[in-house]
């Protein structure tokens, strides 16, 4: 493209949204149980929220609670 030309570059494609995968009731129950155990052991509320969000992201991809927790701890 030449400097000063009247043609505009093509617009970039809009980012595509990923299809959201909902957690099953069993996954939700397992995560709640896991978080209760961590809070009982003294995890602060801000740490707990961060940990829960990380766990949910991994569990939506199909990981179990144990695998997701180990992946976060790496």
Image: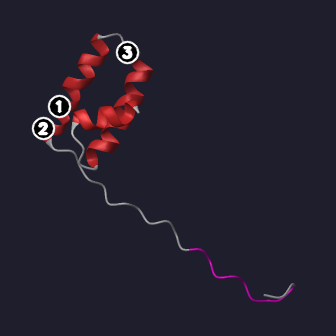
Queried whether the magenta region covers residue 7, the answer comes back as yes
Which SS does the magenta portion mostly show?
loop
Does 48 sit above or below residue 9?
above
Look at the image and tell me in which quarter the N terminus lies: bottom right
Queried whether the magenta region covers residue 49, the answer comes back as no
Q: Which residues are magenta?
A: 4-12
Do tag 2 and tag 1 residues touch (Cβ < 8 Å)?
Answer: yes
- Residue at image position (40%, 18%) is 45
Q: CA distance from mark 2 to mark 1?
A: 6 Å
What residue did someone put label 1 on?
Answer: 30
Q: Circle 3 — which element? A: loop
Q: How many marks?
A: 3
Q: Residues within 10 Å of mark 1 (few under 14, many from 20)?
A: some
Q: CA distance from mark 3 to mark 2?
A: 23 Å
What residue did someone put label 3 on?
Answer: 43
Look at the image and tell me in which quarter the C terminus lies: top left
Q: Residue 23 occupies which quadrant of the picture?
A: top left
What residue did someone put label 2 on?
Answer: 26
- Residue at image position (49%, 65%) is 15
Q: Circle 1 — which element? A: helix
């Amino acid at each position: 493209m030449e400097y000063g030309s009247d043609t505009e570059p093509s617009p970039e494609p809009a980012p595509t949204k990923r299809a959201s995968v909902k957690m099953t009731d069993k996954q939700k129950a397992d995560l709640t149980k896991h978080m209760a155990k961590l809070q009982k052991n003294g995890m602060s509320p801000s740490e707990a929220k961060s940990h829960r969000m990380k766990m949910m992201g991994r569990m939506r991809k199909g990981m179990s609670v144990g695998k997701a927790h180990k992946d976060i701890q790496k």
